[in-house]
Image: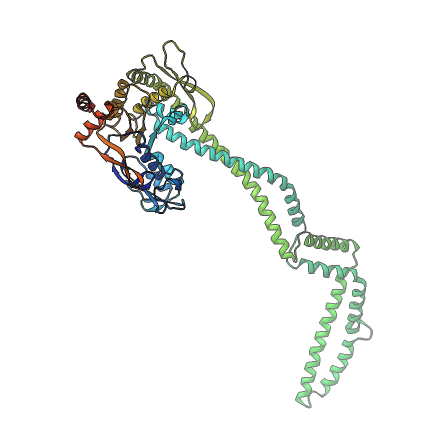
Amino acid sequence: MLKQLYINNFALIGEMDVAFPGKLTVITGETGAGKSIFLEALGLVLGNRADVAALQNKTKKCIIEAIFDAKNLNLTSFFEENELDTDDTIVLRREINAEGKSRNFLNDTPVGLNVLKILAEKLIDIHSQHQTLLLNQTNFQLEIVDAFAESLDIFKNYKRVFSNLNKLNETLKALLEQETQAKKELDYYQFLFNELDETEIKPNILKILEEESTTLENAETIKTNLLSVANAIGDGDINLLNTLSGLKQQLNAISKFKSNYNDFLSRLNSSYIELKELANDLVDAESGVNYDTQKLEIVNLRLDKLNRLLKKHNAKSEEELLIIKNEIEGKLSQFNSIETQIEKTKKEISHTKATCTKLANDLTKFRVKALSNIEQQVKEILTNLSMPNAEFKIEIKLSNELTVFGFDQLKFLFSANRGAAVNELHKVASGGELSRLMLALKSLLATKKQLPTIIFDEIDTGVSGDVADKIGNILLKMGNTLQVITITHLPQMASKGMHHLFVYKKDEANKTTSYIKQLNNEERIIEIAKMLSTGNPTPAALVNAKDLLSLGY
């Protein structure tokens, strides 16, 4: 509930600090005194657009502060979603400087206007003539029906599941788009991968193949030279090993004469053995070299393919080609992953849709069962509001597809006159009729769920004193379960208030200033008597005012 509203330097108000005790508060005052100013100020602190023209003193900033008691409004999720500290007392403050720039605070924490607007819907409901447009909105109609059907919790759960279903459908859509794109690229990447895989890329393979190609191309020269060297060392008629053998005999003959001669013999013997092994290796190497045109062609093809792949992928080495191959393989595996995700998401959608369908069917059952009771109670209230011939019907049709509201499509139908067929509200109801119908629905809604503070801005416009009295009784009853504030011009309504605020203005120096004060019992009698009279209150008007107040509550 709204506990206090502080206004400084706004429109006709210099400074105003107003307390709102709760239950039903009435606000009265002459036309133009400034009753609507406090609504405009409240709208600013609740997130409405700021206008520097509203500053009374253009050299000072405007400050508007509203304090709410929110312990019964269950705002924990709001605070958590906006990363704010939870508190049962909410202090909203709006500051507008002379340049028109504004700052907004929630419990001294700076917040954006969007946060204020979201919170405003949970704290206060300002009912004005244009708000009757809500009657044609499906979400408001469903709020009424679900409150009576006691299906608000089911609907809340349904909306959560339906939101999840929409998210899953969006996920599936994105995955299918990825799959379509991946399919376009799949063949290309598969070709690239197969090309790299078939080439059998290994570190240093390019160098190995180049050496093998060179060897094959020069096989005859290599064989000739290897064989010539092998023969010169050990296999020819004249060779080094035979010569070394004779030299060994000569050194052996003198080795006994001096120790270092024996060392010469040992060193020569080592050379002999090394050359003999070399000759054998040369022979083996020569036998391993064969001129094979077919193998040379294969090796050169592999070399060409490797060099082409290096150029194609702008790679500098086999290692880089292997990295590219792994990356392509990863993309191919991602495609398989997309297919897996699609199947998983489809299963989740199927399960979630089944849950949604069950909840939607439950909602329909509860809603249909509640319709006649709502219609009957609305008719009773409208009859009390001097509309005895009014008819109110709720039409419900089922959609083939799940919507944010379930399967149900609602229409509020109305007729104010005897014998007239019911039709959609905007086609048959006048502004005054819509206003009374809205009052009837909100008064019933207040008995079924916790509502925020409701402010009625001259809901009694264009009605008789008798109807105003009945409207006042309804507001008084609503005040037993929630805070109601109403601005009125009629004494019958003003007499119903548990608290009475009076707005007036004074001409001071070169400006006009609005003030507001809470009236005591004696002041209320005089104010209501003035509303009953033309000019100064007559004795009869004072008596009538006392009677109204004694009957008011």
Using residue 51 as the reference point, say whether residue 29 is left or right of it.
left
| Residue lying furthest top | 419
Residue 145 in view: yes
Residue 249, position as x, y percentages in the image:
74, 83
Q: Quadrant of the N terminus?
A: top left
Query: What number of labels is visible?
Result: 0
- Residue 476, horizontal then vertical, whole percent: 24, 25
- Residue at (36, 10) in percent of width and height: 418
The type of colouring in the image is: rainbow
The residue furthest front is 509
- Residue 68 in sight from this viewpoint: no
Find the residue positioned furthest to the right.
237
Q: Residue 293's image quarter?
A: bottom right
Give the side of residue 342 with respect to residue 232, left or right.
left
User: Which is nearer the eye, 118 or 349?
Assistant: 118
**If the image is split into quadrants, where does the C terminus sit?**
top left
User: x, y (%) of residue 44?
Assistant: 36, 38
| Closer to the camera in the image, 5 or 396 | 5
Write down the quadrant of residue 516 in the picture: top left
Residue 508 vertical position relative to residue 238 in the rendered view, above or below:
above
Residue 278's place in the image compared with 50, above or below, is below
User: What residue lies at 79% left-to-right and 75% top-to-bottom?
Assistant: 239
**Residue 504 in the image: x percent, y percent?**
27, 34
Foreground pick, 365 / 196 = 365
